[in-house]
Image: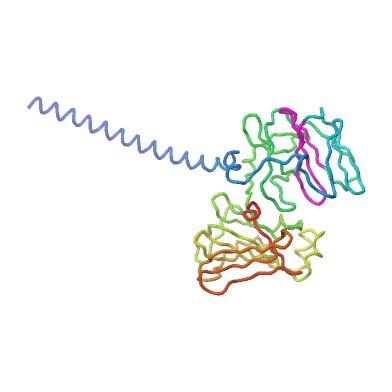
Amino acid sequence: MKNNSKFIERLLILIVIIVFISLGFITYQRYKNNNDDEQIINNYYNLEFLFNNGYVRLANTIDSFNNDEVSFTLNDNTLVIESEDTEKVISGLPNNNLKIYYNYLKDDCYEFAGLDSNELYYANFCISDKDSSSFERISTNVKEIYVPSAFKDSVYVTSNNIISNFIIVNTLNEIKYISYKEGVLGIYDNLEEVMPYFDYVCASDNLSICNDIMVYSTFDKHLVFNYNLDDVIKNDIGEDLIVQDFFGVFETNVNIKDLENMNFNEFNKKYEYLFTVYVLDKNNNLYTIQMNNNAISNKALVNAISVSSETVRNIEYKKDDNNVTSVVINFVNGEPIEIVESDTLDIITSTLYDRK
């Protein structure tokens, strides 16, 4: 009996130990899974993720610049910019051997980054400006310089106190952007603090209103409006829309070319328009999201509406001189839908398409 009692006592102790170990393991797994989820979110803004998934690429150097109307030349520690009727000199470089990266901003405006070992020199200017420019040393621990793989006119990674599309990787592999702090230009803040999305479609490839009428695709392929990044766009039965491909169609009651120099507030009050985003979801179903003056002005959360009960076989983008001028949506069964550009209708590809 005594031996049996000891056996039972040891067995109970063993069971208690196993229970505590099991509870501890379960708690650890939950903690690990929660941390993994947080790590996945944070992981969006590391270089490996952004570069390997095609969101960013290395910035081009001036050696690869190819434009019949403008040329860049590094000469005697200065950058010389020549156009048909203008020559500008940007001074301030430490030597004639460093790499000069360039990035197009808009119209005739560019930004430049000179990298001398780990020292970064920065300048931006517009060719039409009469004021002279010079390079300014803004960091001493830069390793590489990147830019978004695709972008539309007037859409920037950051445009708070400086307009720039350079993405800076420092010697600690932190991803930074250029900004001012107490009036001094430098590399202060991490990209994840502003959390830009790199996939989007906007109202026009050529107008400044692109930045005002826009739909983003998040990293997990949900869609959000640029004026509300917290609420994902749902379909007409209340499900989250998961995007596979999308493009925009911008229609106005006037010739679109007449709007090139107009700001958004003036345009939104003066003209009628309809911006339609065609969305192919993960199951090859086609939806549209439609926004007019009223919806944009009131920052409405518009749902996606199903176009057809038939699934889509493919979407054909037809080009003329490298510009998409028509789109044909072919269904598995049923008649295709063709959308053709005109003076009052503009087709805007998404950055998903642009990167391809």
Question: For this view, does 269 lie left or right of residue 56?
Answer: right
Of 337 and 214, nearer the camera is: 337
Of 1 and 127, nearer the camera is: 127
Is 39 located above or below residue 13 in the figure?
Answer: below
> Residue 301: image x %, image y %?
60, 61
Of 41 and 356, nearer the camera is: 356
Magenta span: 98-124
> Residue 231: image x %, image y %?
57, 55
> Residue 77: image x %, image y %?
85, 31
Name the residue rendered at 57%, 41% in the picture. Answer: 49
Picture quadrant of residue 248 = bottom right
Is 112 located above or below residue 205 in the figure?
Answer: above
Question: For this view, does 172 lie left or right of residue 83?
Answer: left
Question: For this view, does 347 lie left or right of residue 331?
Answer: right
Q: Quadrant of the N terminus?
A: top left
Res. 297 visible in picture: no
Name the residue rendered at 71%, 57% in the picture. Answer: 212
